[in-house]
């Protein structure tokens, strides 16, 4: 008998949605591709060749970097990663396990920009790596590599393509075939696919040791049962009740994201710590300090669930800090009916670069506009700064008539909108609150 207790089902959803949502996207990637990244099999890179645009329907995708992504399955054995000399260009390869823990980093900040080799292996591997090769231990057999290459515009793409082509993955055993992610059986009711995915995938990709007690406490739902699915043949009323509770949990999580659930300063939601739930895995390039992993265990799962749904594969704040805003200085929703300004004085203190990107609501996609500008920032050519060094950015649907405003214009979509500031290699003052982003002010 499977429990349909609402509290237990809700707890299971919050605990497990990061795993299920993430691996759904991994499957999507290897089968269909994501945005400008075409489908690629496990243990192969797919390189986007252009900056992301409105056709790339992935939540909060950035327009600052060109993506290189790979899904790794170590069931085929260790995988060798080779990176080229980028001659100082900003890039990052972010490693994300099945439960969405950022467990390793390679790139400009983490390891420098000289050519390097890494052997990707599962936890517990104790073999001998090739000469001059560093080892990265992955917490789960399937994980993602999310690569980003700083790009200043279309003219910069050929140089990036050369770097992408020189970034390679190769299986140590080239004949081995990755097993891939287990499929949900056709007889499992669609309303209970979440539970079946959590059951199957948590067994193949176990959570961190610190999370296993929480998973065991959900056993009444059948998610720890091995063998055949416990969800086949359940009474229709039981399926309907459980499905409705899971749907309500999803709706509540979406509302939680809308409300922020994070510190808010000058209207900006500051999710600098939303990826700090990883307290177990610190491989190459990670930072193990109180500033970046101070989340209490009791708060971990809701934070992780929201981070997965609202910003999957987002970076830790020591690599890139994000700030999100829905409202103006009066607390009113940002809308195409008005013109706004954001005055940055000073601009964000970063070691790499920063950007402001425009997104639609509720999809959080990039939006078409007349000048094909989806973000602007420190790498944008032609911005007009004030004599004191400040930058006044104009946000509006309609193109400004003043040439200075037009140079600093970030087009807004129809309806409501939500910008994001990204700060790559941020100064610690951004994360600890010493630097505050000012409110967006309504001009008309």
Image (cartoon, rainbow, N blue to C red):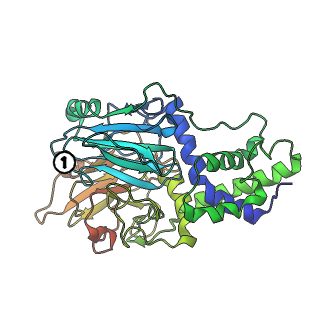
- In the rendered image of this protein, does residue 295 appear above or below residue 250? below
Estimate the x, y position of residue 162 in percent, counting from the top left: 23, 30
Name the residue beneath numbered marker 1.
Answer: 403
Instruction: Give residue 190's quadrant in the image.
Output: top right
Residue drawn at point x = 19 percent, y = 48 percent: 403
Q: Residue 20 vs residue 346: left or right?
A: right
Q: Residue 141 vs residue 167: left or right?
A: right
Residue 253 showing in the rendered view: yes
Estimate the x, y position of residue 135 in percent, counting from the top left: 35, 47
Q: Residue 60 vs residue 183: left or right?
A: left
Instruction: Give residue 346's quadrant in the image.
Output: bottom left
| Quadrant of the image containing the N terminus | bottom right
Residue drawn at point x = 33 percent, y = 55 percent: 422
Q: Nearer the viewer, residue 189 or 217?
A: 217
Residue at the outermost top position: 175
Residue drawn at point x = 52 percent, y = 68 percent: 261
Estimate the x, y position of residue 227 in percent, counting from the top left: 75, 43
Residue 256 showing in the rendered view: no
Instruction: Give residue 45's quadrant in the image.
Output: top left
Estimate the x, y position of residue 6 in percent, counting from the top left: 77, 63
């Amino acid at each position: 008998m499977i429990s349909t207790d609402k509290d237990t089902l809700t707890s299971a959803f919050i605990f497990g949605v990061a795993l299920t949502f993430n691996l759904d996207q991994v499957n999507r990637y290897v089968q269909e591709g994501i945005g400008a990244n075409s489908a690629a099999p496990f243990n192969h890179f797919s390189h986007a060749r252009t900056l992301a645009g409105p056709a790339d329907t992935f939540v909060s995708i950035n327009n600052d970097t060109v993506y290189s992504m790979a899904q790794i399955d170590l069931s085929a054995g260790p995988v060798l990663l080779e990176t080229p000399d980028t001659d100082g260009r900003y890039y990052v390869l972010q490693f994300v396990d099945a439960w969405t823990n950022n467990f390793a980093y390679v790139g400009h900040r983490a390891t420098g920009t000289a050519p390097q080799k890494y052997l990707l292996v599962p936890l517990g591997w104790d073999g001998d790596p090739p000469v001059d090769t560093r080892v990265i231990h992955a917490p789960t057999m399937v994980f993602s590599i999310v690569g980003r290459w700083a790009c200043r515009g279309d003219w910069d793409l050929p140089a990036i393509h050369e770097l992408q082509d020189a970034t390679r993955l190769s299986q140590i055993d080239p004949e081995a075939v990755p097993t891939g992610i287990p499929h949900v059986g056709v007889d499992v009711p669609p309303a209970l696919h979440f539970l079946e995915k959590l059951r199957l995938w948590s067994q193949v990709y176990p959570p961190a040791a610190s999370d296993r007690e929480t998973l065991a406490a959900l056993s009444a739902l059948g998610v720890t049962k091995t063998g055949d699915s416990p969800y086949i043949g359940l009474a229709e009323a039981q399926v309907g009740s459980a499905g409705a509770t899971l749907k309500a949990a999803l709706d509540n999580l979406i509302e939680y994201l809308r409300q922020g659930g994070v510190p808010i300063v000058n209207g900006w939601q500051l999710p600098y710590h939303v990826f700090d739930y990883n307290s177990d895995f610190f491989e190459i390039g990670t930072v193990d300090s109180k500033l970046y992993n101070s989340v209490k265990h009791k708060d971990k799962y809701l934070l992780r669930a929201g981070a997965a749904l609202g910003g999957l594969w987002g970076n830790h704040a020591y690599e890139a800090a994000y700030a999100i805003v829905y409202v103006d200085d009066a607390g009113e929703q940002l809308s195409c009916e008005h013109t706004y300004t954001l005055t940055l004085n000073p601009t964000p203190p970063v070691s790499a670069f920063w950007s402001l990107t425009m997104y639609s609501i509720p999809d959080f996609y990039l939006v078409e506009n007349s000048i094909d500008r989806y973000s602007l920032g420190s790498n944008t050519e032609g911005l007009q700064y004030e004599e004191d060094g400040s930058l006044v950015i104009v946000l509006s649907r309609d193109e400004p008539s003043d040439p200075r405003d037009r140079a600093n214009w970030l087009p807004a979509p129809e309806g409501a909108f939500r910008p994001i500031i990204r700060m790559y290699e941020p100064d610690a003052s951004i994360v600890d609150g010493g630097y505050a982003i000012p409110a967006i002010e309504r001009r008309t």
